Image (cartoon, rainbow, N blue to C red):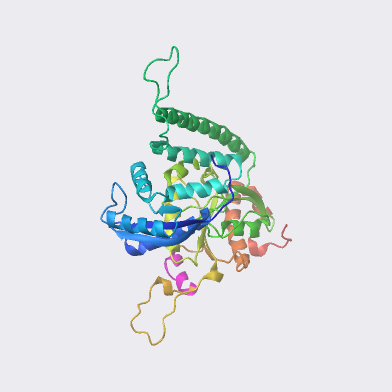
Amino acid sequence: MIEKENIVYERSVLIGVVTQYQDEEKSKEYLDELEFLTYTAGGEVIKRFSQKLDTPNPKTFIGTGKMEQVLNFVKENNIDTAVFDDELSPAQQKNIERILKCKVVDRTYLILDIFAQRAKTSYARTQVELAQYEYLMPRLAGLWTHLERQRGGIGMRGPGETEIETDRRIVRDKITLLKKKLKTIDKQMEVQRGNRGQLVRVSLVGYTNVGKSTLMNVISKSEVFAENKLFATLDTTVRKVVIRNLPFLLTDTVGFIRKLPTQLVESFKSTLDEVRESDLLLHVVDISHPNFEDHIASVNQILDEIEGADKPTLMVFNKIDAYQPEKIEEDDLVTEKTAAHNTLKEWKKTWMNRVGDDVLFISAINKENMEEFRKKVYEAVRKIHITRFPYNNFLYPEYDKYTGEEKE
């Protein structure tokens, strides 16, 4: 189901709505993210459509007038795919496909498609396949119309079973099989985690595309796949890292995103066990992104869902090399100063100051402030280690008092 194919860029349009819960600014923000998701999945966005609605249309998600406008554009510009920013109901998807006569994808399926392309290991592929089948289950109606009934033979008289019922049964069986397979792999991974000894476990968490894998490569001197696309990392990677003479385990996890499909949260819960069982979290944030505060809130919400919000956490603000505050000209007396105009120094005096010493500003790609990063991580890991093993206190002195050579 998730065979990898060569990506051919598909001509796509994006469709979103402005509602009472999602104002125009928020809608634009979500469509920006959706465009990046579409690009990551292999699509080229030709145009965006947006409509103000109190509530989405239960039949076609957007109004009839806007739908006609989209239909004309799709016909005139040979559009392959229409991508909707919110999850469509099976009936909405069926109705829209009938009107537009092109492929209709919602945000949930787009994310699932990216995951299917990126999954490398058997474990990740099984998790994604399970999420895909759970998404597909209520959408089977209308997929098969070539047979009305399957005929019985001798000894098989009666109404038989409709093709849709057969397909539902096949999908249900497949879901049960995949869940059993995941349980087996979960047990194996639990044993692996148990075999890692008593080393302190540190996990990199954060929004997708904030530079977690790049940071992992810098501090663990390993080659984890990193790319400027969403969900470049799906498979959990664990590396042993030594700062000064203090060893610990560092885990790179899957990135989070707003409106994360519930199917994925469920099927990836076992992967997120790495986060749940960590002793320390490094919450990596892309400070150059204009909505990084929303990203922090989204990550905290998912951490809360997987019972990882109460872990000791270091906030690591990455990509300081790319951060450019907006400027107000000296003679401009109209523009009001907002958070977008803050310099890094001014940001440090905001709510970040209340977080205390657990805040870092770095650039993983340019290796800026990495010495301060190593010091903070060393001290945090040391504190956990000597709490667990008080008699090891003399082995790991404070960072500034260490006199030996750092191990490679």
The vertical placement of 349 against 154, above or below, is: below
Is residue 237 shown in magenta? no
Residue at 60% of width from left, 39% of height from top? 122
**Residue 109 coordinates in the image, percent (x, y):** 45, 47
Left-right relation of 217 to 11:
right
Q: Which residues are magenta?
A: 344-354
**Residue 59 coordinates in the image, percent (x, y):** 29, 46
Q: How many marks?
A: 0
Q: Residue furthest bottom?
A: 331
Q: Is residue 260 visible?
A: no
**Residue 149 coordinates in the image, percent (x, y):** 40, 25
Is residue 347 shown in magenta? yes
Residue at 42% of width from left, 33% of height from top? 146
- Nearest the camera: 359 or 179? 179
Principal SS element in the magenta part?
helix
Q: Quadrant of the C terminus?
A: bottom right
- Nearest the camera: 94 or 185? 94
Left-right relation of 329 to 255:
left
